[in-house]
């Protein structure tokens, strides 16, 4: 019998994995500083498409470097919030991981380490998310949110600050606050 | 803009990958003969749950052996049929691969070798398929078909021969014949 609980699809990168957003440390900025000796200010990334945010094709280089996804910091507050949401919703972690097939197992291992309470049945690695039918989708990319079946919720990332046509949350406290009222 | 074409989700194992079904060679039977020196007759597998079909826990052992999924033969007729279906439908390959995370990359590589015409955006590795919303699902397992959003189509495998509550296809010719009439 199908569950009557509502379902949420939650993206990984920039949502539960802190690739390039949080105030203190971002994975891209840290790797860029390490490899290029240059500090990129977070403010300079605002509104810039992810792939253009760092010079020299560094973004694509990092994304295809073994270990990049395995070592991404967890987004602050994400673990407790996902656990809390699971009390009332069927939560699925849905990542467009198929673009970086070398990292499929890394991303699985990362989830097992940081989100061990998410069952493998609730992990989805895909490309196009338009056939994922959950009641809510929390994601940082319009390409995913614009075609989702349920309610779209945009999680603030540097590249999406100018998007205005989706319900916006800025951190995991705001996710919990919004979802507790639906 | 969303495509108006209808979509099909197609399972991998026992549907496009010949794990234990075709008349000539089956991957399980071959590996069992190789490792245990015993030939299992295909007829003895009919109606038996997959996990119980071979003695000594051999099924689970094989499924977790590196290389098992990478070396599965292609189901006869699957390549040409999938290519043909892609002319009229948005085709997604949807595998419950998350149960065997060590094989995620193997399965991706297998698809790249045998189905290079399927874009990564149309590959989904998941657990529970109940949130995959396509118009059709071609699969050998009731656990997936019973909760699907569109029309369920059961692809005959030894373990499912006694299932009667889904539209059945016995080979890829029958898939093409059925789908050309919808």
Image (tube, coloured by chain):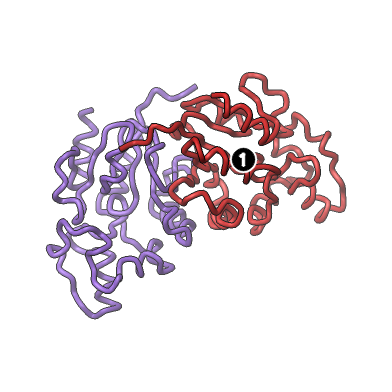
Chain colours: A red, B purple
Where residue B29 sits in the image (x, y, percent)?
A: 24, 68
Relative to B35, residue A115 above or below: above
Judging depth in this view, the residue of A164 and B22 nearest the camera is A164
Q: Is residue B145 left or right of residue B120?
A: left
Tag 1 secondary structure: helix
**Residue at 83% of width from left, 34% of height from top?**
A43
**Residue at 27% of width from left, 74% of height from top?**
B56
Position of the N terminus of chain A by quadrant: top left
Where residue B89 sits in the image (x, y, percent)?
A: 35, 32
**Residue at 28% of width from left, 57% of height from top?**
B18
Position of the C terminus of chain A by quadrant: top right
User: Badge 1: few (under 14), some or many (20 or more) residues near its Cα, within 10 Å?
Assistant: some
Relative to A168, residue B173 above or below: below
Where residue B113 sits in the image (x, y, percent)?
A: 42, 55
**Residue at 46% of width from left, 51% of height from top?**
A120
Residue sticking out furthest to the top: A165
Residue B136 falls in which quadrant of the image? top left
Relative to A30, residue A138 above or below: above
Q: Is residue B177 left or right of residue A116?
A: left
Residue sticking out furthest to the right: A38
Relative to B155, residue B54 above or below: below
Check disc 1 and report the residue beneath it.
A81
Q: Is residue B112 left or right of residue A111?
A: left
| Subunit under mark 1 | A
Where residue B181 sits in the image (x, y, percent)?
A: 20, 29
Judging depth in this view, the residue of A31 and A152 nearest the camera is A152
Q: Is residue B118 left or right of residue A154?
A: left
Residue sticking out furthest to the bottom: B37
How many tags in the picture? Answer: 1
């Amino acid at each position: 019998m199908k569950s009557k609980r509502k379902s949420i699809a939650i993206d990984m990168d920039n949502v539960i994995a802190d690739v390039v957003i949080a105030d203190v440390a971002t994975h891209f900025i840290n790797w860029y500083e390490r490899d290029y000796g240059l500090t990129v200010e977070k403010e300079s990334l605002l509104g810039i498409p992810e792939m253009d945010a760092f010079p020299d094709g560094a973004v694509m280089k990092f994304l295809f470097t073994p270990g990049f996804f395995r070592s991404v910091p967890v987004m602050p507050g994400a673990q407790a919030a996902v656990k809390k949401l699971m009390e009332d919703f069927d939560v699925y972690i849905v990542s467009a991981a198929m673009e970086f097939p070398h990292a499929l197992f890394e991303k699985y291992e990362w989830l097992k380490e940081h989100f061990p309470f998410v069952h493998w049945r609730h992990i989805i690695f895909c490309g196009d998310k338009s056939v994922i039918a959950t009641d809510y989708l929390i994601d940082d990319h319009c390409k995913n949110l614009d075609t989702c079946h349920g309610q779209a919720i945009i999680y603030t990332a540097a590249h999406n600050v100018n998007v205005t046509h989706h319900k916006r949350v800025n951190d995991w406290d705001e996710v919990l606050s919004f979802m507790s009222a639906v």
